[in-house]
Amino acid sequence: MRGRRPDRHPDPVRRPSTGRGKDSRRPWRHGASLLGDLKYGPDFKRFDYVNPNAPKGGTVRLSGFGGTYDNFNPVVAGVKGTIANGVAEIYDTLLVSPLDEVETSYGCSRKV
């Protein structure tokens, strides 16, 4: 190990943490907020503004321009084919931002 400074770890990604015990890990977080604390706890089932007794069912019709499409892949939009209007509505995200908090996101996936 000649020529290497003793205060630098050879692999910066696997550098040991300082100020913590050997077996300590970061706690699991169900959400992240840039401004203050999270409003909802880790076991929340729904946001406060959601009506659990809302009527279910019905039909949604989305209008669009262009009329025809031949692609559902938004990655190649504008490069190959014509993307279907509203295609973003068929994909889910990993995080959701609530309507009653600013700069906050909660994870959509759960531990099984």
Image: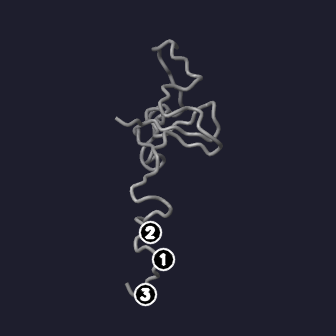
Q: Which mark is residue 3?
A: 3
Colour scheme shown: one colour
Quarter of the figure that contains the C terminus? top left
Distance between the Cα atoms at labels 3 and 2?
17 Å
Q: Which mark is residue 12?
A: 2
Element assignment for label 1: loop
Residue type at numbered disc 3: Gly
Q: Name which of mark 3 and mark 2 comes first in the sequence.
A: 3
Residue type at numbered disc 2: Pro
Residue, disc 1: 7
Residue found 47% across the figure and 14% down from its top: 56
Give the class, few, some or many, for how many residues have Cα within 10 Å of label 2's Cα (few <14, many ≥20).
Answer: few
Q: Name which of mark 2 and mark 1 comes first in the sequence.
A: 1
Distance between the Cα atoms at labels 2 and 1?
12 Å
Distance between the Cα atoms at labels 3 and 1?
12 Å
Left or right of 35? Residue 9 is left
Residue found 45% across the figure and 33% down from its top: 68
Question: Which is more toward the observer, 112 or 96?
Answer: 112
**Residue 28 in the image, given as x and y percentages of width and height:** 45, 44
**Residue 111 in the image, given as x and y percentages of width and height:** 37, 37
Element assignment for label 3: loop
Residue found 40% across the figure and 59% down from its top: 22
